Every structure is written in C-alpha cells, then in structure tokens.
Amino acid sequence: MSSQRPKAKHMVTAEDRTDSVDISEKGRNADGETISSGRRLYMQFVAYGGCTDTASLTQTLTQACIPGVLYEDVNDPFGVGLLTFSESPDYFLDEFRDVLHSQAFATLTPKPEYTMFGRTYSIGYESDLDETLVGRPSRRVCDPSLTWAVWYPLRRSGSFEQLSVEEQNVALMEHGGIGRAFGRAGLAYDIRLACHGMDKNDNDFVVALLGSDLAPLSKVVQRMRKTTQTSQHLDRLGPFFVGRVVWQSSDNG
C-alpha cells in the first residue's frame, strides 16, 4: 500500500474569485470584437398620494438640481410619481433622500407598492456602451416630447430559465420586436432595467414605456400579452403607474 498522501485540493481564495468574476457590461464593436464597460445608470421611481400642489414639488426639485422627472398620476387625482437617476447608488441615500425628507415631500403619503429601483444593462451586441447604458436612457426620460409614461416591474417564471439559450433568444426577439416597431414609428420608446436582488418583491426587471400619447403605450402592452415570454414565462407583472410629465430636469445628460 502506498504511503503517499493524496495531493491537497486547491482551495479557492478570494483572489481567485475576484480574478474570475467580470461584472462589466459587454458589447461588440464594428469589427465584431467584444467590448466592455463598467458604467451603468441606476434609476429609482417613487410614488406619493395626497398631493394638492405640484408647484412646491417642482420648485424643490429644481432648487436641489435633481436629475429626473415628476409625473401626475392619471389614476389618482392627488397622486404623483418621481423618477431620478445616477451612476452611483450612493446618490439615492445621500442627495436624493435629503430631497425626499424636505417639507414639500414629507407631507405627502408614500405609496411603497410603486417603488422601483434598477440598473441599465447591455445585451451583448451594442457598439456604443456608454450611449446604451447612460446617455440614451437619461435623455429619453427627460425628452420634453415624451410626455406620457407607464412604469412597471416584472418577474419571469422559472420556466424561462429552463429554456435553452436558443429558445430564450427567440422569445426575446419576438418580445423586443414589438418595442422596436413602435420605436421606429415614433409612437413609443422603452427603458429596461435589471433589478435582480435590488427589488423588495424579488422582481427581475423594471420597464418604462414613454411616448407623446398614451394610446400607443397601451397598445404595446396589449400586443406583448400574446408573446411567448409574456403568455408562458411570466410570473407577475405590475403594479402599473401611468402618468403625464409635469416637470423634467433641464440637464438631461
């Protein structure tokens, strides 16, 4: 019998884990080479009731130089929704929290069921990651021509994760094709945020539909009901916040 001891297995160290984990967003340049970026935009949506004076809110937001949008809630005559964004998550616990603690907002009634928080992400084929992750979404929410918005969270069912990569891509292309068609027609534009591990209800994504008119936004949701992803692989959807812009920051990146 051999007296040699078996070789000890290599222990995974913190250094090994750091070297093997890449959390950057990926894209492809014109030559088909993989590109990456560590930038991303965080966006948070909060809603309130009990508002009888939006002017005091817009004054507070303007004076504080908050980047974002204030909406009036079409389903609540005293309701408002506020969307803000930053590349740093610390911003929401520092500057933004101070604004929400101000007198104008502290007297309102929070609606925590509408709170949404997510980050921009890439799919892997984008050629300009800074534009995809930061520039376009910040400009889009502050576009003065896009006066209507529908914000909602969603969670996919486990069945979607059990599909093959090819099957997932087909489902996503079908779903995304509707949004692209409405965008090319100038009727509706979307913003998609990942919120894995950042949402209190364990949702996967936050979606915004933006446009100059409400009807096309409703039509997008209606048509997406029939897609494979929505009809077969969605666990939950909503609640929906539907609002019209009452204020936008002047600095939209």
Image (cartoon, grey):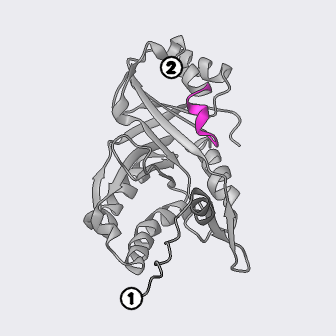
Label 2 crowding class (10 Å Cα cut-off): few <14, some 14-19, many 20+? some
Name the amino acid type tagged 1: Met
The residue that appears at 49% across and 17% down in the rendered structure is: 105
| 48 lies above or below 203 | above
Q: Is residue 16 visible?
A: yes
Question: Which residue is depicted at the point 64% across and 68% down?
Answer: 27
- Judging by the rendered image, the residue that carries numbered circle 1 is 1
Q: In which quarter of the image is residue 165?
A: bottom left
Q: Is residue 31 left or right of residue 200?
A: right
- The quadrant of the picture occupied by the N terminus is bottom left
Residue under pointer 2: 54
Give the image location of residue 122, x and y in percent.
57, 62
Q: Position of residue 5 (x, y in %)?
A: 46, 78
Which is nearer the N-term, disc 1 or disc 2?
1
The type of residue carrying mark 2 is: Thr
Disc ID at residue 14: none
Few, some or many residues within 10 Å of mark 1 (<14, 14–19, 20+): few
Which secondary structure lies at badge 1? loop
> Residue 2 location, x and y as percent?
43, 87
236 sits to left or right of 170: left
In magenta, the rendered stretch is 86-94
- Residue closest to the eye, 112 or 90: 90
- Residue 240 located left or right of residue 122: left
Quarter of the image for residue 91 reads top right
- x then y, percent, for residue 88: 63, 40
Viewer-nearest residue: 170 or 5: 5
